[in-house]
Image (cartoon, rainbow, N blue to C red):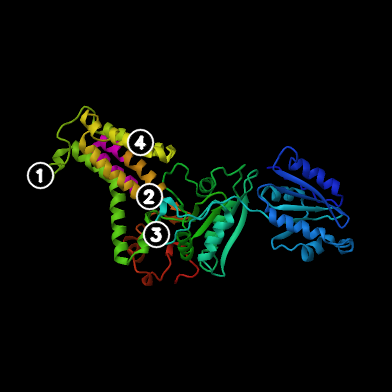
Amino acid sequence: METKKHHKVSKELIDNTSYLKEALAIGKNFDVLQIDVEYTGIDMAIYLVDGFAKDDIMNRLMEFLAQLGREELEEDTVPKLMKRYIPYIEIATESDLDAIVDAVLAGQTALVIDGADEAILIDTRSYPARGPEEPDIERVVRGARDGYVETLVFNTALTRRRVRDRTLRMEYLQVGRRSKTDIVITYIEDIADPKLVSKIKDSVSKIDTDGLPMAEKTIEEYVSGQHWNPFPMVRYTERPDTAASHLFEGHVCIIVDGSPSVIITPTTFWHHLQHAEEYRNKPIIGAYLKFVRFISVWASLFLLPIWFLFAANPSLLPDALSFIGPEEAGKIPLILQILIIEVGIDMLRMASIHTPSSLATALGLVAALMIGDLAVSVGLFTSEVVLYFAIVAIGTFATPSYELGLANRIVRIVLLLLTSVFDMYGFFIGITLFVLWLSKMKSFGVPYLWPFIPFNLRAFRDVLLRSPMPLKNRRPRMLHPKDPDR
């Protein structure tokens, strides 16, 4: 990669303005402005992006500078402006013209002064932002209603509001040669494993690409690897309370500007089965909800392959379960029926994303006709296939992690194909390979099935049950926290 040549700020204003005008394409970009001004007899130029700068703050600064007398800026112009005459908190100097260009395009305002070899950067930016609303996919009956948004500083503030520890660290990076995307890596220094923090920072800093069009998803693919593995190596959350609880455990979070999803690292398979609703209820209720959720997830994975195995081999069933399986073979083979519905459900899911809310009712009617009584009555599907697939679909939707739900769908299809080709042997070989595969996976060095493999009784109890908070007095051992006690 070529070394970037740095252009220093000159004491001649015309040299600086000619370079900045070309670099910022003043005149070609209608929203990038160069304002030539004169205060106390000194020529100056202001550079900003219209839409980012706060107009009221800029007007006040310009009014304040206009009131200064000539003698007040005769010597040490930049230090005097910095320390005395520009009444603003977020202010800095910069001597590199290329860094000034990047800062202006990121939303800051640059003040370039004739006779000074430094420019002043004033952070007057205000990004367009929506309110911190409750996330759609992580709703709770009781609990906080705020959620992360697409603006980085809002998200860091929402996090710090819940984690007021003096050792909370938020380290800033920029990634992308052209996009210059702002990223913050946050962790609690007194808790998080320094090796884990260093590993994640190194992974992020080594990203070499033009830009991050998909924000946090692009970051995940660079830092976690395993590109052909459908299972998520990190966890996404749009809830500040969820991110805060993981920070207190010793996890490291990555916040990306432009995305409402915060990346939590590292994670195990069981992290993707957690939901805030379980911890917003009494422990016994939370344990029950977790139990129901586990049943739903296991049903979404194994129910259809098991039913297909028994339907294809009725002799395997005891007399008490002889009702399982279709009475008539049907016009289409069972495996083909199942695969058609699998594809049909995904088509409906994608259609629902692109369908305006005003047409959602019409889409629901079409879905009811396509996979309902009409499809059964014409002989396209058997009623049992529709019934069991409805249960599987509910289990998929009950999976807290959207990414895990999609990965489980791929595993379910593979198990069905193995069972249809190799019968009972294919089913058991498929499950064995599935468990072995998960047991070999690691997320930033953490075993994916921990604490089941390798086994840890105390931690496994917390996975299966919703333990009372006073009893959760130890942090997860697999994170190697500096302070293991809560």
Q: Which residue is mark 4?
A: 362
Q: Which of the numbered marks, if any, corresponds to residue 276?
A: 3
Q: CA distance from mark 3 to mark 4?
A: 33 Å
**Earlier along the polypeptide chain: callout 4 or callout 1?**
1
Q: Residue at x 37, y 35 (%)?
A: 347
Q: Badges 4 and 1: C-beta atoms under 8 Å apart?
A: no
* Amino acid type indicated by mark 1: Asp
Q: Residue at x 24, y 28 (%)?
A: 332
Q: For marks 1 and 2, give the one nearer the viewer.
A: 1
Q: CA distance from mark 3 to mark 2?
A: 25 Å
| Residue toward you, 193 or 113 | 113
Identify the magenta region. Answer: 415-439
Q: In this view, which residue lies farthest toward the left?
A: 319
The answer to whether residue 427 is seen in the rendering is no
Q: CA distance from mark 4 to mark 1?
A: 44 Å
Q: Which residue is mark 1?
A: 319
